[in-house]
Amino acid sequence: MSLLRDLVSARTWLAMTQHLAGLFGGFVAIFIVTFGLGFGVGGLFLALAGLPLLGLTLRLADVFARAERARFALFTGVRIPAWPAPGSPGRVGFRWGIIPRWPMWREGSTWAELGYALLRLPVSAVAATVSITAWAMGLVLLALPAYGRFMPSGGPTIGDTVLHTRAELTLSVVIGALLLLAAPQLTRGLAIADTALARRLLGPRRDLAARVIELERSRERVVDAGETERRRIERDLHDGAQQRLVALAMELGRAQAKFADDPDAARDRISREPGRRHGCHCSAGGGTPPLRAGRSVSYSVTWTERAISAGSGFLADDPEGLAQVLDATDDLAADPRPPGAFPYGGADLLRIRVGRYRILHEIDATGQSITVLHLGRVA
């Protein structure tokens, strides 16, 4: 019963349609490739004028390969893994979009697609011819007893022999029935062989395709990790350097304010490297101007990025006032709760006023640190 069902099975007639569609596509492909390669190679002797035609031929061969993979997926349900597209990772691309680079001619994928385009017509022609012949001969021999007597000689003639006896007609029916039952298997078998050829030429081997996919995933992971690390380094370089520059600018502002009263102390302050002074915690999250020399320190003072940005903004128009603020924050290292400080929402969150400025700082007794959270100026 399965042999009879194969006569009307959708798989059988999809296979036949596949052969006929391949025959039509093969006519188009063999014309394009033979014309493109022939005239392209000939044009190389005319100041390399054939290079664009060769590039166009390779482009069209890649398009035809994609169309063929879609055709096999439609008619047979087989999805053939594709070669990497020209210009993508793992395959050489074109120069200016049309001129093939020399390494392309050494790639197996290039010749596989060109070879497939050339083979498509003869392969489909053989498959379609054999399939149609099997179906036609089976039907002709099976129906011979019904129409044979109406032929001019009273039956089919082989040489001088006319086939019209009962035994000959019975043998014709038997052979026709066998051919008709074998025709679906033959049609589908040729489709399977055709699919195997396409899988061999239109894409990498399965193990190679799996390796390519794994390499692409590994590459994506490496790229993502590298991008994350690059951004982290950029952020550290930008923020760290920025805070050090701000700390240096604030130190220079303090020195500028002291030049009029104490030039020697100002020169001594400028000569010291801010980044090596005690209490300078310059990092991506914040920093602090250096403490004054000779100060007894029990707490480390750290400025948040917001406070440093505010201080650098006040530096341009009020260096003397900012110098007073910095001196006051230096004093916090020895006395985190100076006279005049009052709680601001908590026992360890205090606000002090220095001239025109208000300083909000937080005390961490466990870590022996003070964080300057905000610096504001009274209007």
Image (cartoon, helix red, strand yellow):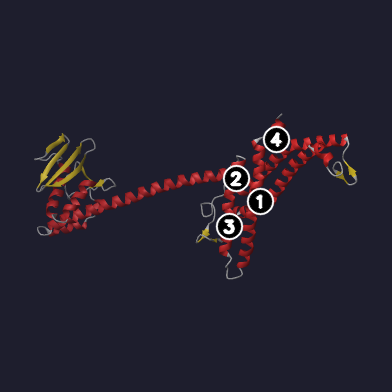
Q: Is there CB contact under 8 Å for labels 4 and 1?
A: no
Q: Secondary structure beneath disc 3?
A: helix
Q: Which residue is mark 1?
A: 120
Q: Is 100 left, or right, of 330 in this rendering?
A: right
Please state which of residues 82 and 144 is positioned toward the viewer in this rendering: 144
Q: Residue at x 17, y 41 (%)?
A: 361
**Between discs 2 and 4, the one toward the N terminus:** 4
Q: Is 257 left, or right, of 230 in this rendering?
A: left
**Between discs 3 and 2, the one toward the N terminus:** 3
Q: Looking at numbered disc 2 in the image, what kind of residue is underneath it?
A: Arg
Picture layout, residue 216 above or below residue 33? above
Tell me if mark 3 has few (under 14), some (14-19) or many (20+) residues whose alpha carbon lies within 10 angstroms of its own: many
Give the Cα separation between the discs numbered 3 and 2: 20 Å
Q: Residue at x 19, y 38 (%)?
A: 363
Q: Which residue is mark 3?
A: 58
Give the Cα separation between the discs numbered 4 and 3: 41 Å
Q: Nearer the viewer, mark 4 or mark 3?
A: 4
Q: Position of residue 2 (x, y in %)?
A: 70, 30
Q: Is 124 left, or right, of 283 in this rendering?
A: right
Picture layout, residue 330 above or below residue 145? below
Q: Nearer the viewer, mark 3 or mark 1?
A: 1
**Between discs 4 and 3, the one toward the N terminus:** 4
Q: Looking at numbered disc 4 in the image, what kind of residue is underneath it?
A: Leu
Give the Cα separation between the discs numbered 1 and 2: 13 Å
Q: Secondary structure beneath disc 4?
A: helix
Give the Cα separation between the discs numbered 2 and 4: 23 Å
Q: Is there CB contact under 8 Å for labels 4 and 3?
A: no
**Between discs 4 and 1, the one toward the N terminus:** 4
Give the Cα separation between the discs numbered 3 and 1: 16 Å
Q: Which residue is mark 2?
A: 71
Q: Which residue is mark 4?
A: 7
